[in-house]
Amino acid sequence: MGTKAAAFILSLLATVLFATGSFASDGTLPDDPLYQAKISTEEAKLKAAVDPLEKAALHTEFAGNRLAELQEIASEKPGLARGLADRYEASVRAAMNERGGAGPKPGNGRGST
């Protein structure tokens, strides 16, 4: 079995295994006991992703999750809002970093001089 096939199977298994946990924790906020399970599921999805564009898409998705959580919690629990804002910013930065590493490399014959 090739490396790509093994990575695909691992990614598929991770998705199936973590899907059940993410359903239980999808609507959680930082003060909910299941919130850490939600974050752990997101981290596992990132570890299972091998393609930088896939990782960038996941970071973008997770940034959207943090933004939605931030909007929901900001007025009621401002102390938790700062942590969510920090996580949102970290997800956006990570997505940009992953995307930056996914483009054509210099000297690959695609018009570089």
Image (tube, rainbow, N blue to C red):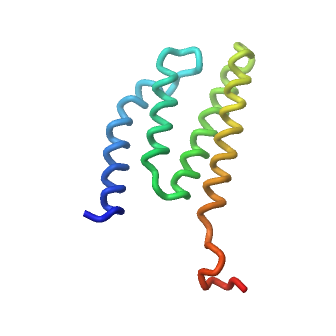
Residue 66 position within the rendered picture, expressed as x and y whole percent measured from the top left: 63, 32
Quarter the N terminus occupies: bottom left
> Total label count?
0
Residue placed furthest toward the front: 107
In x, y percent, where is residue 29? 57, 21
**Residue plotted at (41% across, 24% down):** 24
Asked if residue 53 lies left or right of residue 24, the reply is right
Report the residue at 70% width, 14% height from top: 77
Please name the residue shown 45% across and 34% down the image. Answer: 41
Residue 109 vertical placement versus 55 (above, below) = below
Residue 15 relative to residue 52: left or right: left
Front-most of residues 106 and 104: 106
**Image location (x, y in percent) of residue 109:** 61, 85
- Which residue appears at 36% of the width and 62% of the height? 4
Query: In the rendering, at what x and y percent does residue 87 appear?
Result: 66, 33
> Looking at the rendering, in which quadrant would you find the C terminus?
bottom right
Quarter residue 85 falls in: top right
